[in-house]
Image (cartoon, rainbow, N blue to C red):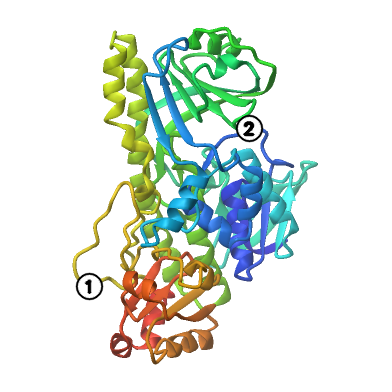
Amino acid sequence: MTARILVVGCGPVGATLALQLAQLGVPSIVVDRATAATPYPKMDFVNARSMELLHRLGVGEPVRTRGVPPGYDFTFHWYANATEPPVAVWNYPSVDGQRDAIRRTNDGTMPAQPYQRLTGSILEEILRDAVRAHPLVELREGWTFRSLTQDDDGVTVELSDPDGSPHDLRAAYAVGCDGAGSAVRAAAGIDVDLIGPTSRHCDVYFRSSDPALRPHGRYFLGIHAGGVMLVSRDEDVTWTATFPYEGDPPADPLAVVRLRLGTPIRFDEVIAVAHWEGRLGVARRYRAGRVLLAGDAAHQFYPTGGHGANTGLGDAADLGWKLAGVIQGWGGAGLLSAYELERRPVALINREMSFNLLEVWRRFPALAAVGASPAQLAGYLEQDAYQIDNLGIHFGARYASPIVVAGDGPEPPWRWRSITAALWPGMRLPALFLADGTQLFDHLGTGFAVLDQDPGAAGATLAEAGRRRGVPIRHVTVDDDGCRKIIGSSLTLIRPDQHVAWHGEPADLRDIGEEALLDIVCGI
């Protein structure tokens, strides 16, 4: 068996990578040892940047349809005990609220798409169905990765089929999207650097209509000082209770949940019980020759701050177009070298941000246990409420790599709560509504785009030079006062992941030259 790209793992990251490749015309084989989406909910928050990426892949609508209805706020309740009102409430606007803010605040500081609450199992099901249906993706379910060897020309991977029979597959590149315990990472000899605590946790996934679960109104997360967290998965009757433990797994996790809540809640149906290890790890390398890592295979975070799976979806968007360029011949070796240079720093930063919020989670029950009063707990949590209003983190990636033409002048500021509306090489292009009501992002296409605000359409020569090379590139002419105000340069070269590769004036393009510019951004 042969494949240009082999993707190991069909979770949200592996499926997104395969769909990204297919969108650019590159076929792949995806193998996954499971035959269906996981029954465990895993993630519960698709951030706004991930929704931009999923929208571009054509799966944004089913994610919205099957997610939590858009009118519910994203609310955290912090309880000293289950019988008293919460000592603190952290509130973030609903999807509808954020969508309204996006329409009102058309200045580049907002996302093109609002976030979406959705369990990871449903997201995986949506993406797996899209992979099954795509003619350029061959999904082999029930197939298990065993080992690999590689040489200068490709990777030979040993797999076993659902019956256990061995098969060899030859691929130009193999990508491990096979989770925190990645067998691909181990086979490639890549180690993981850890910081902070490592701890064991139990998740109880259940259904219950017991009003005792919402004694003081609706919430997304209920954090209890007794050492348990409740997550409302659908704003109805589906929940997850999560608690840490030491030693052997508890024999009766339902009893542990009741004990730590301090109230005898009713479990109508237990869907599943799962155990997992929390840790803060980032792979030392994202690439070993022709083997690459993405998602949890490359980084592992605690589920605080919405960083884990969302960082992985960003990996897939970045790696997909770079692999496409190398396979199709318009990209050089520098593209894959830039993958680690761009994405690993994002994981390292997001690990610190996850650690930052994890400390709040850890200290809240610790403070309650040593006698902090409700007022003291409320004061402690008040000063950390900024944690959930964190658009700047999810949109803050700034790529400094050889395939980005460095910007002139001082770097734009970075803000926690909002997106920096600035045109800077390596940053995501600011999102805007044009005067005709359309989204600027929807004009960019799926490959490179030359955003041309020059009256003489000077960017046409750059787009034509790209087409001669086989680069997927679109020439987008825009005459819009709002766009010109935020995106001041006459010419902007935008990558397939919506990050800026270069910007300047027609004279700047003449100075650097179309061919030289394309050499840089295509990793030649």
Report the front residue among 291 and 296: 296
* 27 in relation to 169, above or below: below
Residue found at x 48% / y 84%: 466
Rendering quarter of residue 507 = bottom left
Can see residue 445?
Answer: yes
Can see residue 293?
Answer: no
Q: Which mark is residue 341?
A: none
Count of numbered marks: 2
Q: Tag 1: residue type?
A: Asp
Residue 514 drawn at (x, y percent): 39, 87
* 463 in relation to 115, above or below: below
Q: Which residue is mark 1?
A: 408
Q: Tag 2: residue type?
A: Tyr
Q: Which residue is mark 2?
A: 40
Tag 1's secondary structure? loop
Rendering quarter of residue 238 = top right
Q: Earlier in the sequence, mark 2 or mark 1?
A: 2
